[in-house]
Image (spheres, grey):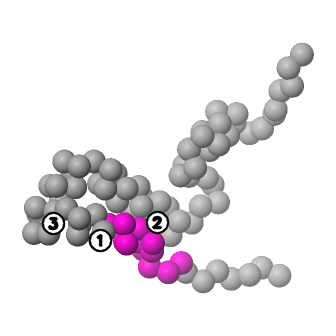
Amino acid sequence: MSELRYGGNPQLEHLHARYTGTMHPDMTKHEWAVHQHRDTSAAVVAQVPLLTYMSVADGESRARTRFRLCEHMLQPCGPPPETQELI
């Protein structure tokens, strides 16, 4: 017999294992916003027509726009808020 793994929701566990950026119940607002900004920036960098559209709209070259978006991925929403440690 195959071994079954019992968890809360096997489909959700599979989704989290396959796609690392999917949300989980313990995710903070800041983490969610960071994921959204990084996903958007990565999508723009990966799609040449969208990158061209943004570079024309900003009046910059594609290379400069790509560099700015990649640099923005480091901390797209600023530094993370300080968390209080529970004792």
Disc 2 + disc 1, Cβ < 8 Å: no
In the image, the segment drawn in magenta is 68-80
Q: Secondary structure at mark 3?
A: loop
Q: Which mark is residue 68?
A: 1
Instruction: Determine whether 70 is above or below 53 in the image.
Output: below
Q: Which mark is residue 61?
A: 3
Q: CA distance from mark 2 to mark 3?
A: 25 Å
The residue pinned by badge 2 equals 34
Query: Looking at numbered disc 2 in the image, what kind of residue is underneath it?
Result: Val
Q: Which residue sits at x=62%, y=44%? A: 16
Answer yes or no: is residue 29 visible: no
Q: CA distance from mark 2 to mark 1?
A: 16 Å
Q: Secondary structure at mark 1?
A: helix
Q: Which residue sits at x=37%, y=72%? A: 71
Q: CA distance from mark 3 to mark 1?
A: 11 Å
Q: Secondary structure at mark 2?
A: helix
Q: Which residue sits at x=42%, y=61%? A: 38
Of the numbered discs 2 and 3, the one sitting upstream in the chain is 2
Label 3 crowd (10 A; few <14 / some 14-19 / many >=20): some
Dividing the picture into quadrants, the one containing residue 8 is top right
Query: Looking at numbered disc 3 in the image, what kind of residue is underneath it?
Result: Ser
Look at discs 3 and 1 and give the one toward the viewer: 3
Dividing the picture into quadrants, the one containing residue 59 is bottom left
Question: Which quarter of the rendered picture does the N terminus lie within?
Answer: top right
Q: Which residue sits at x=19%, y=48%? A: 49
